[in-house]
Each structure stands twice: as C-alpha cells, then as structure tokens.
Amino acid sequence: MFRKLCGERTLKNVVIVTNMWGAVDRRVGERREAELSRGKDFFKPALEKSAQMARHENTVLSAQGILRLILNNHPLPLRIQVELVDEHKGVSNTDAGGELNQELNAQIMKNEEDMRTLRKEMQQAIQDKDEETREELEGVIKQAEEDNQKLREETKKLKNGIQHAAAALTAIAAMAAVAATVMSGGVSPVDVLSGAITVANMCAGIYSQL
C-alpha cells in the first residue's frame, strides 16, 4: 500500500527509519531489522527501488544522519498527489484506492458465494424438515451478512483513510523541507524527526483503526 501511495519513482527518496533500539537487545534488533529488509512483504521491494534504511537511536547524531539522507534527495510528487491533484481522480480510482477496493471486493464476493451455498443447504434442510440444521444455517447466514456489511463500511472508511495517509506523507515531506534550518542549528533535529515519526504513526494508526 505504501508503494501505491508513493509510486515507484519516489521510492528512491524514501528513508525507512527504525526506532526503539534502546528497548531491545542489540542482536534482537539487528535480527528483526534484517528480517524486515529481506522480506518481500516488508521493506525489500522498496529497498530494491533504492529506498534506504536508517536507525533513529534517540540521539542528535542519528537524527542528523537521517536528515542528511533526506537533504540529498531531489523532491518528487507522490503518486497519489499526482492522481488526486493533476489527474483529478477520485480516491477510489487511485492506485492505492484500487488496491484496497480490490482486496475488499474479493472478500465480499467470497462471502456472497458462501452465503449462496449456505442458502441452498438451508433450503434442503427445510425440505428435509431438519429444524436444528435450518436454525444453525440461519445464524451462520446472518453473521455472514453482517460481515459483508462491515466490509462495505470499511470500504467507505478506507477512502477517507487514504486521503489522511496522503496528507500525512505530505506533512512528512514538508518537515524534511525544514531540515536545512535544523542542520544550521535553528531547530533540534531530534524534535523534528520525532515529529515526523509521530505523523507517520498517526498515518499507520488510521489503517489499524479501519
């Protein structure tokens, strides 16, 4: 999803920051970092497109190092920014929206197919005058219908979630723009980086709540 939001072209500007290094044993942290960097379901696809990984160890030095990585980037618009602003697409028609809709629609279709099968079984139970099975299937169908309704509601929420995520990523990019001031000593780099991480966590929180 992150790749859909950013676009393949902008991944070279991405710096994936790991934190909380003081909360785990160093070897454990390094093992987890390696798993994330090598896993195709995690950071490997982005790293293969020239994204970088860095460690924020809650120090001025590590924060400055991360900001230097960002300062070396040539700014590029996010894919979702191009789609929403330049191409005037609706959220559901963006690459990110399409990805989410596809997954949810596939689940909805599967649930509907399951319900059709259950209804056939219930009709057979009615014909066989099997009241116990009929009542059991009736409960299962009701639950499946409720699940489908929840999925439809999630689809609506996700459209708003994508917009918030795009705004959060834009905010992070804006924070990078003040990095020059940070490097000149005008603002604490730890404070700015902590702010960026907070925004990113807010973005992640949107999806965890949907």
Image (spheres, helix red, strand yellow):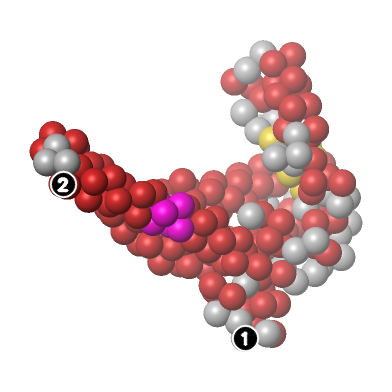
Under circle 2, the secondary element is: helix
Few, some or many C-alpha atoms within 10 Å of disc 1 (few <14, some 14-19, many ≥20)?
few
Q: Which residue, given by chain and number where applicable, does mark 1 sit on?
A: 88
Under circle 1, the secondary element is: loop
Can residue 113 be seen in this snapshot?
A: yes
Residue 150 or 132: which is nearer the viewer?
132
Segment colored magenta: 108-113
Can you say whether 29 is above or below 143 in the image? above
Q: Which quadrant would the N terminus be assigned to in this image? A: bottom right
Question: How would you classify the magenta stretch by its main secondary structure?
Answer: helix
The residue shown at (75%, 34%) is 39
The residue shown at (60%, 46%) is 197
Can residue 167 be seen in this snapshot?
A: no
Residue 45 or 55: which is nearer the viewer?
45
- Between the residue at mark 1 and the residue at mark 2, the CA separation in whole angstroms equals 53 Å
- Quadrant housing residue 78: bottom right
- Quadrant housing residue 90: bottom right
Q: Which residue, given by chain and number where applicable, does mark 2 sit on?
A: 126
